[in-house]
């Protein structure tokens, strides 16, 4: 077993995920390194912020610079100069992005190569080959992610394909030291979500992602779907809510029993001026920030909050100095990583409800 439970507080869980590049304490959050890089942040800075794992996208790396290029560098860890755990996603989520998908078939996803314009098919077997060659610690299966608001018939078809493709991924994956996680689908249709979760939980995966959420459904729909999914997942495997990264959503999902998260939200928001705080969010581009000498978040304590203030970061923004994006991104990532670290400590000490209530973001 690669996952153990270290403690509980109600539905919330603290655990440890063992990987080839070290143990990862859970709950844990992964900054997104889609093409092998978390924008504006270096690997040493991510370690400083408290990241134990990152997630990259195998499809994006396959397109550019190419799997062969990463292999020549010694694998994805060596290519990125990242010493800790790595996950790779499959590319299934890209299907909901405009301009990516040409068509779905039972064989796989037919997409247009963004560089050459040629049509290529992404198959479960092909994805397993790519992820194995990249050498991440955890690979995600190829899933069929329906868009938010898709007709039930389309969601039902994607649910069927997701199960079939997961089985093909399991058969094709070489295993070894790389773990393999499934991804449940089913939209916000309770029956389809339960079917997907039940079918995948019956297969011997190392962990289970809850996919196809935080893409346009309401918060109530997402939380209901997460709760129903968790009820059908094995207790002794990590549960991974994909694509969720705001403080409130993280805390709500941790309370339900989710162990693993990823999202570009902290860095993407940071590059657009959104500063995450324990008490909410602020816009560093607002004029009032130019006279505010407080840290980005007085309760944070990260290096950026200790060394600078809102007025200076606002000044950098007005001066078109790109360093402001780095400062806000570092703070946002450090704050979210601090949140999950604090949640783990609270779960182990039996004080998670009070910890959760202390965040008003």
Image (cartoon, rainbow, N blue to C red):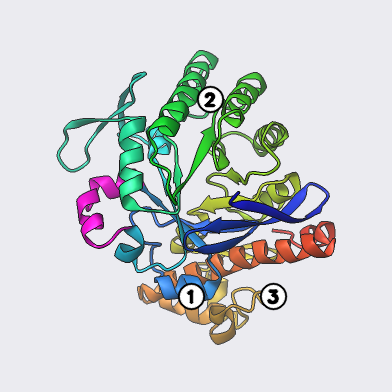
The alpha-carbon separation of the residues under discs 2 and 3 comes to: 39 Å
The alpha-carbon separation of the residues under discs 3 and 1 comes to: 19 Å
* Residue 201 falls within the magenta-colored stretch: no
Is residue 293 toward the left or the right of residue 92 in the image? Answer: right
Are there few (<14), some (14-19), or many (20+) residues within 10 Å of tag 1?
A: many
Q: Secondary structure at mark 1?
A: helix
Q: Give the camera-side residue of 361 and 60.
A: 60
Judging by the rendered image, the residue that carries numbered circle 3 is: 299
138 over 82 or under it: above or below: above
Q: Residue furthest top?
A: 153
Pinpoint residue 278: horizontal percent, then vertical percent: 69, 66
Q: Look at discs 1 and 2 and give the one toward the viewer.
A: 2
Span colored in magenta: 58-75
Judging by the rendered image, the residue that carries numbered circle 1 is: 314
Pinpoint residue 202: horizontal percent, then vertical percent: 60, 28
Judging by the rendered image, the residue that carries numbered circle 2 is: 149
Secondary structure, magenta segment, majority class: helix
Dots 2, 3 in contact, CB < 8 A? no
Q: Secondary structure at mark 3?
A: loop
Residue at (67, 47) in percent of width and height: 258
- The answer to whether residue 151 shows anywhere in this view is yes
Residue at (33, 21) in percent of width and height: 107
């Amino acid at each position: 077993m690669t996952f153990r439970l270290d403690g509980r507080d109600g539905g919330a869980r603290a655990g440890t995920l063992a990987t080839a590049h070290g143990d990862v304490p859970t709950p844990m959050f992964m900054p997104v390194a889609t093409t092998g890089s978390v924008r504006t942040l270096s690997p040493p800075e991510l370690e400083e912020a408290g990241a134990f794992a990152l997630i990259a996208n195998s499809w994006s790396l396959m397109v550019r610079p190419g799997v062969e290029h990463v292999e020549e560098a010694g694998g994805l860890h060596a290519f990125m100069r990242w010493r800790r755990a790595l996950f790779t996603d499959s590319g299934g989520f890209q299907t909901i992005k405009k301009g990516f998908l040409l068509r779905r078939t039972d064989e796989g996803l037919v997409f247009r190569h963004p560089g050459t314009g040629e049509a290529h098919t992404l198959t479960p077997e092909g994805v397993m080959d790519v992820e194995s060659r990249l050498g991440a610690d955890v690979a995600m299966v190829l899933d069929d992610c329906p868009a938010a608001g898709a007709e039930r018939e389309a969601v039902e078809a994607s649910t069927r394909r997701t199960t079939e493709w997961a089985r093909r991924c399991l058969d094709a994956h070489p295993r070894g030291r790389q773990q393999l996680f499934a991804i449940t689908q089913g939209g916000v249709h309770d029956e389809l979500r339960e079917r997907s979760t039940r079918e995948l939980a019956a297969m011997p995966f190392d962990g289970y992602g809850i996919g196809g959420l935080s893409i346009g459904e309401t918060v109530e729909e997402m939380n209901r779907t997460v709760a129903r999914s968790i009820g059908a997942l094995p207790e002794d495997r990590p549960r991974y809510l994909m694509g969720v990264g705001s403080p409130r959503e993280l805390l709500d999902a941790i309370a339900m029993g989710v162990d693993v998260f990823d999202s570009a939200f902290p860095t993407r928001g940071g590059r657009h001026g959104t500063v995450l705080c324990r008490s909410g969010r602020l816009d560093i581009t607002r004029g009032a920030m130019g006279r505010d000498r407080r840290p980005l978040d007085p309760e944070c304590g990260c290096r950026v909050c200790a060394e600078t203030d809102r007025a200076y970061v606002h000044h950098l923004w007005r001066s078109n100095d790109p360093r402001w994006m780095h400062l806000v991104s570092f703070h946002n990532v450090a704050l979210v990583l601090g949140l999950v670290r604090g949640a783990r400590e609270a779960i182990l000490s039996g004080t998670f409800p009070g910890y959760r209530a202390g965040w008003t973001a």
